[in-house]
Image (cartoon, rainbow, N blue to C red):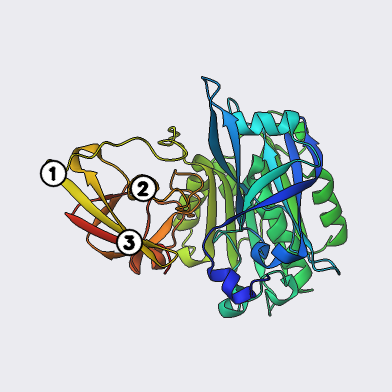
Amino acid sequence: MSVPANAAARRRAAFHTLTVAQVRRLTEDAIEVTFAVPPKLSGYYDYLPGQYVALRTQMPDDDGVPREVRRSYSICAAPVQFDDGSSEIRVAIKRDLGGQFSTWANAELSAGATMDVMSPMGAFISKHGDVSNVLTGMNHPEDLVRGAGTFVAIAAGSGITPVIAIARTLLAANAETRFDLVYANKASMDVMFLEELADLKDRYPARLALHHVLSREQRIAPLMSGRLDADKLEALMGTAIHGDDVDEWFLCGPFELVQLCRDVLAARGVPTDRIRFELFTTGTPSRPEGQAGRRVVVDESEENYKITFTLDGLKADILSPTHARESILNAALRVRPDVPFACAGGVCGTCRAKLVSGHVDMAENYALEPDEVDNGYVLTCQSRPTTPEVTVDYDV
């Protein structure tokens, strides 16, 4: 059964089992994985360029016991639907140092394998032009932008994954759109989608400006060599980047780079509503409290918070010991294993819910827009009760 586009834009995360159609090597440490989406599921996988999916599988822990593992990856291709009604989802997986899932995927994942793939989520999308049109333009990139625009993206490493999808779509949507891309890597052999970026430059030579900055490899232009710091960023904005009258800025990469860019743009007076950003790491990595929630023992004779949540129209109550400092997500997972989440680190936004009553302390937020926070939305993986009773709604 297909889901209407406007419904898909508001949908809650849901997993379906998809088959790997192709695994293509991008660099020594990165692969592109294509999942085939059959016609009956295509509506569930409509997406906007810049969104991500979560992958779910079982992997053995240190004791050899199979455990659920979830990892989020941005979609790296512009939306497409084939004549037979099928579609596809492409993600890039870069091997992280010590990363169990990414190491396994790069070494062993192959065509024919199956995996649970979450319906696309995320707000790292272009909002230029008619926002209502964007929200109903799932899988119709030609409808995303009505007027020409000027866009700048700054990405590092695997941060190129959503950016290349955004760039492809915006450049194709309007013949007068201009896109500047600054892409930082250690060396040329680390550049993901090198050929695809070159092809994109050949297709739009006058409208796409591509700037490769390599920190450990000397380039002819000194400005394109060395670490991308505040001085280099300021110099780029004053020379290579057409930084005036930019409609939208897209920032994607590690926390330090994204925060640096945000600080520089703020100092230059760029309005925050023109800046979109997405993090691949927060800069303060910590192990999530278990992919299915950490164990918490409740003693009703002791002091507890009462957490009420609504999911898929069903309401549940759960007690959480005040001394446990338990997140709402962790508490909810103890009674409903299907509560939506992916990164558990405040980055992806999958666990977003509306705070209906009570108050919480949200430790980190790298996913919600300011207007979402103002309207009462919280990241349940980062939110802990501060009042005796708290109610959240995942369905809003």
The image position of residue 315, as x and y in percent, is 34, 63
Query: Which residue is depicted at the point 64% across and 71% down?
Result: 3
Query: Circle 3 sits on which residue?
Result: 392
Q: Nearer the viewer, mark 3 or mark 2?
A: 3
The image position of residue 115, as x and y in percent, is 67, 44
| Vertical side of 1 occupied by 266: above or below | above
Q: For residue 158, what is the image quadrant?
A: top right
- Viewed as shown, does residue 252 lie left or right of 295? right
Q: Nearer the viewer, residue 61 or 208?
A: 61
> Amino acid type of disc 1?
Glu
> Amino acid type of disc 2?
Gln
Query: Circle 1 sits on which residue?
Result: 303
How far is disc 1 from disc 2 in space, using C-alphas? 21 Å
How far is disc 3 from disc 1 in space, using C-alphas? 20 Å
Which quadrant of the rendered structure holds the C terminus?
bottom left
Query: Which residue is depicted at the point 59% across and 40% down?
Result: 228
- Please report whichever mark, 3 or 2, sits nearer to the chain's N-terminal start: 2
Q: Nearer the viewer, mark 3 or mark 1?
A: 1
Secondary element at tag 2 = loop
Q: Residues within 10 Å of mark 1 (few under 14, many from 20)?
A: some
| Vertical side of 102 occupied by 250: above or below | below
**Quick check: can you spot residue 223?**
no
Q: Residues within 10 Å of mark 3 (few under 14, many from 20)?
A: many
| Vertical side of 206 occupied by 146: above or below | below
- Viewed as shown, does residue 38 lie left or right of 348? right
Q: For residue 393, what is the image quadrant?
A: bottom left
> Amino acid type of disc 3?
Val
Secondary element at tag 1 = loop
Query: Circle 2 sits on which residue?
Result: 382
| Vertical side of 385 occupied by 215: above or below | above
**Quick check: can you spot residue 346?**
yes
